[in-house]
Image (spheres, rainbow, N blue to C red):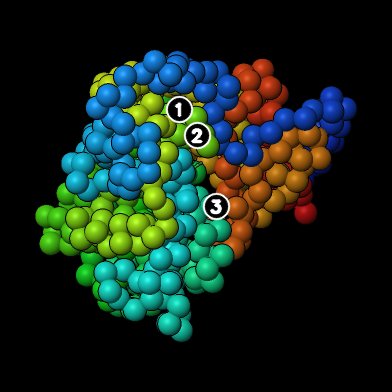
Amino acid sequence: MKAYQDMNQDELKTLHQQLSKQYQDMKDLHLQLNMARGKPDFSQVQLSMPLLDVINSHYDFTDKKDYCNYGILDGIDEAKQLFADILETTPEHIIVYGNSSLTIMFDQISRGFTHGYLGHTPWCHLDKVKFLCPVPGYDRHFAITERFGIEMISIPMDENGPDMDLVEKYVNNDESVKGIWCVPQYSNPSGITYSDEVVERFAHLKPAAPDFRIFWDNAYIIHHLYDHHQDHVKNILEACQEAGNPDLVFEFCSTSKVTFPGAGVAAMATSINNKKDILKHLTVQSIGHDKLNQLRHAEYFKSIEDLKHHMSQQAELLRPKFEMVLDIFDKELKPLHIGTWSHPLGGYFITFEAMDNCAQDIVQKCKEAGVILTDAGATFPYGKDPHDSVIRIAPSYPPLNELKQATELFVLCVKLVSVEKLLK
Ligand code: PLP
């Protein structure tokens, strides 16, 4: 196979005819496949079904009568311990909430606007509020900041994390920069894990704004694809404490992709000061979250080892899907030099980087042939990818046979659009 860039116009024209014919054949299959969102498939969710049985009408609530009532706002002890173990901290730093970490993040931003953090001016009184957004990033983070009218500033990332020179420049000099979104391990969507040096530089920031916070969304902290080859992001809470910056970080996670998306348990870890401040607000907002679901999770995962075992079973289901997509990319695209892609060790996504100005057309062509992908641009603030090159691939949800078809169509569309760009 010859790299497309090395082909002359005649060769490209012939190739275009062949690919167009293949594309029409694919269209005629009338596929209806969806690779848009990183959802677990039903076989993954089924692994957690026994969790639904651990509490029933015979459960001995003698010492836990309070769990069946209002109260215990920061979560039951067992759930706090479980999340402390996941996030490698201690229970006094943890608040256990309801089912969604994204809701906690939204609430934290909202609280910044209405009441402010630790007595600082609520952001609604300021002319300008800005957030740093490492890109490509999680579209729903950007949707939250956009919803509040926060100005988003893109920060490029490499395999070690965000460009820290740029982060330091903004955070340490601009008082209107109030936060940064981070997915530090198996990042959504690039799959990278921040290096120790990056975490240390975060911990040592000297923000111009006293209420600047790092929104550390550790959504994929235990979501490894392999048992022995794993990333491990450095503990930011500890690093911030050691750097004399204990209040700098809000860390989030949930069991959405451990047990049931939409019916798991979410938690936040932060400094004791921040926790007190948050609870003042939360106590007005709620009389307590779903403690029976917290208990169900804590009973099912008696220890962090149980949880790790469960995640390893999840990985067995996910791994073949990731490997199949990557195999097809390697075989079909590598020699052609028309794209690069990530090789994540965990998380839910593969990031594909096409030639400039191709992503939207590739996604559109896939759609016209029946395969829905995440919108091109979605992983950038305001949905605008300046190079129009990044596409997020979510291999988890479709069954293997459908994923294979969808990947083959994707590869065909990448080839077709790339040839169209190279044809003059
Ligand atoms: N954070 C990241 C980085 C995600 O990828 C997702 C879901 O895809 C979420 C948060 C959503 O988490 P939750 O279900 O706890 O709201």
Q: Secondary structure at mark 3?
A: helix
Q: State the separation of the CA atoms marked 2 and 3.
A: 21 Å
- Where disc 2 sits, the SS reads loop
What percent of the width, then of the height, locates residue 381?
54, 61
Q: Nearer the viewer, residue 231 or 66?
A: 66
Residue visible at 23% across and 65% down? 205
Q: Can you give x and y, in whole percent of width and height, for residue 88 in the image?
A: 22, 38
Residue 265: where, in percent of width, then height? Answer: 41, 37
SS under mark 1: loop
Which residue was labeled with disc 2?
A: 263
Name the residue carrying label 1. Answer: 259
44 versus 285 height, above or below: above
Q: Which residue is mark 3?
A: 139
Query: Viewer-nearest of labels 2 and 1?
Result: 2
Circle 2/circle 1 CB separation < 8 Å: yes
Which of the marked residues, 1 or 3, is nearer the chain's N terminus?
3
Q: Observer-nearest residue: 365 or 349?
A: 349
Considering only order in the chain, which callout, 3 or 2, is on the residue closer to the N terminus?
3
